[in-house]
Amino acid sequence: MSIIRKLFTLGDKAFMPDWLSYQPYDTPADVDFYYLKLCGKVHAILRNLHFADYADSIDAKRDIIRLSCSLVAYFQDVISETKVFAAFTERHKKLYGSYLPFYKLDDSYYADEINLYDLYFLVWHHLSMLNRDEIIDPLLCADEKEVDAINDIYALLNEEFEYAPQNERLQLFLQLDDTATIFDIRKRIEYLASSSFLNYMIFDQIIGERAIAYSKAKDLSVEQFERYMYDTRVEYIFNRRAPLLALRYNEILADIIGESHPLYETIRTISERKYGVFLFKEQQEKGDIFQHVHSKTIVALAREERTFKPETLVPDKFAQLMGIVKMGDLWYQMGVAITVDNSEKVGLIDIGAHSFDAIEPKYELLKTMEQAFKQATGGKLLSFAGSDEEYRDFHYRVNEIQCRIVQPKVPEEDLQKHLADLKAKLKPVFGKETKSIAMFFNPKRGLEIYFNIPETIRDSDNPFYNPTEKCPFNQLMTKTDFSKEFIDYLMENQLVEFENTPTRFVVDMPTMLRNADFLLRYYRSDEYWAKPKVTITNH
């Protein structure tokens, strides 16, 4: 399939290529003609609605066709018992106690059948992917026509429920036997990331943006462009997280096949793709032994589907710049690999230099930083400054405390010189429009600085707090500049009163607050799971 296959839907109705873009195959069977016809019926209900009101970027014809196909793909999923949507609802129930966010579900909700609120949610999801800057009302109360249309689609699908055929090809594709290889599994992960009705939109957006960026690069040949896009796609399917619950796509596949499947844990724990320079060391029975040049980490690389030949493997001479993924005890080459000819220069290539950095020392460093921060603030993770001078002074105090914790016997003269050097190198953070900053120590990431928000934070040590200022909930949820941990800290300590920022959509604030964690996962995806923003060197 083309990398940007769904970005250029033509016409004012769905055609077979539109429908097939949601399937893991390219040629239609009889069942696909049935579902394409159903797409036409759904499209007839949606075509006159004003969904463009929900997003400035919406293309009315294209996106209503895509929404029609997406809703029918959900219907096909329920009929065929392929469990793509059920994997989401069951995981949501485990996390939050309900099959869906936002809605008050009662006994009339059946997880293995079509449901009216499923349709509401899927339309909300589709529109939210088009407009990631504003939280859209999950009940779509902006216009009664939208509500009526969803009810009509539900009635249509309910009518078809007893007669709709199962898609056996899709069933077989998403079933895995216990001999499946990582390359079999990769095909399923790629389908879920790029073509399933729950994830295709974010995939098209991100891959499309990357394609545009690459196309603007000077002196980039067609071959190079295709190679970069292929590698981007591979990186995406192994490393990115879906908006729904911020899961990686291998985790979603594991949920689909279920915990009773022999490969459940193997698939669930597939690693992210690591990228870097690897030097060949020796051949062993289980695989070829390579060493990550910068960290000296040893990996056993499987021999299946590699882009280099065995006869090129010369110990301590042959090196590859490549991406690798671990499943079970072996690593597998995934994506483009480039041979590094001169082994003397492999250490100079810093791409992926920190791919194998140990996480534990970073967390140990964060612990001492947190301890120092709390000593400076009287036990809090939050402090405030109104100028660069106040910021530098606070930074100086924290660094001094941390140095005394880590190196209690360092000579005082050396310590003061070190601290003075640090303070001199500290860059100013206040700009012309900056009135105040909040400094939050994130135990999972490190120091975070937030601009012009202290006015809304009700803290006894905050001199900038203004009781008339409210915190913009919409901005806090949708902007990834604000970390999950910072927002959790504000909410758990009741430090802010949220404002339902005037947008084109009125949302019920108590409902939004109950679903805050879901929204944080939804709008952050990759950023939801914090990683230390510190680098440890040997110098």
Image (spheres, helix red, strand yellow):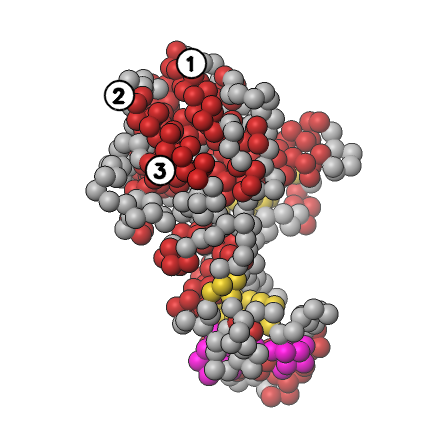
Say which amino acid is labelled 2.
Glu
Which structural element holds mark 3? Answer: helix
- Disc marking residue 33: 1
Is residue 335 visible in this depiction of the protein?
no
Mark nearer the viewer, 3 or 1: 3
CA gap between label 2 and label 1 equals 17 Å
- Disc marking residue 507: none
CA gap between label 2 and label 3 equals 18 Å
Question: For the view shown, which residue lies furthest in the right direction?
Answer: 219
Tell me which numbered mark, 3 or 1, is placed earlier along the sequence.
1
Decide: few, some or many residues near mark 3? Use Cα within 10 Å; few <14, some 14-19, many ≥20: many
Q: Is residue 205 left or right of residue 181?
A: right
Residue that label 2 marks:
162
User: In this view of the protein, which residue sits in the foreground, 213 or 532?
Assistant: 213
The residue stretch that appears in magenta: 372-393
Decide: few, some or many residues near mark 1? Use Cα within 10 Å; few <14, some 14-19, many ≥20: some
